[in-house]
Amino acid sequence: MSVVGSLIFCLDCGDLLENPSTVEGIEIECSQCQAKYPKSKFSNLKVVTSTSADAFPSSLKLKQSVVKTSLGRDELKEGATIKEKCPKCGNDEMHYYTLQLRSADEGATVFYTCTNCGYKFRTNN
């Protein structure tokens, strides 16, 4: 028998053998050449697999480095301007920005800052 990863092959014909844990009896028999192997040889068999970081390249992984996951304080100060009434001073113009803080299937959180008094509040869409 020859072991490659978690696959076990017959030494006589190279056919793939049954998984020892699914075979009844004390022997594993090759379905092609009928060679027999004792199951006891597989009792302490331990399979360990590993892959390198670049083993499975994908276009999504390549884009990971260009995705911005956080914003700096300076980027959040202004945001876009919208005609929205400030609940504190009544000013009709506010800066706003949105962030996806909850699950992707839920709406984004909108952060508002009054351009006049600096009052801040947020809403969940």
Image (cartoon, rainbow, N blue to C red):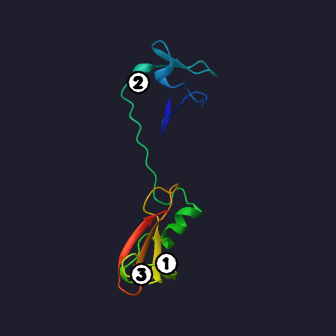
User: Amino acid type of disc 1?
Assistant: Glu
Q: Position of residue 50 (x, y in %)?
A: 43, 48
User: Amino acid type of disc 3?
Assistant: Gly
Q: Position of residue 96 (x, y in %)?
A: 46, 77
Q: Which residue is mark 2?
A: 41
Judge depth for marks 1 and 2 and give the one in front: 1
The residue carrying pointer 1 sits among few (fewer than 14), some (14 to 19) or many (20 or more) residues within 10 Å by Cα, namely some
**Residue found at x 38% / y 72%:** 121
Q: Position of residue 32 (x, y in %)?
A: 64, 22
Judge depth for marks 2 and 3 and give the one in front: 3
Relative vertical location of residue 81 with respect to residue 37 in this rendering, above or below: below
Q: Which mark is residue 102?
A: none
Judge depth for marks 3 and 1 and give the one in front: 3
Q: Position of residue 57 (x, y in %)?
A: 55, 60
Q: Which residue is mark 3?
A: 90
Farthest residue to the right: give it: 32
Relative vertical location of residue 122 with respect to residue 28 in this rendering, above or below: below
**Residue found at x 49% / y 14%:** 24
Label 1 and label 2: CA atoms lie apart by: 75 Å
Sequence-wise, the earlier of marks 1 and 2 is: 2
Of residues 113 and 24, which is closer to you in this image? Answer: 113
In the structure shown, which secondary structural element does the residue marked by tag 3 occupy? loop
The residue carrying pointer 2 sits among few (fewer than 14), some (14 to 19) or many (20 or more) residues within 10 Å by Cα, namely few
Of residues 69 and 94, which is closer to you in this image? Answer: 94
Farthest residue to the front: give it: 90
Asked if disc 3 and disc 1 are in contact, CB closer than 8 Å, the reply is: no
**Residue found at x 41% / y 86%:** 115
Q: Which residue is mark 1?
A: 84
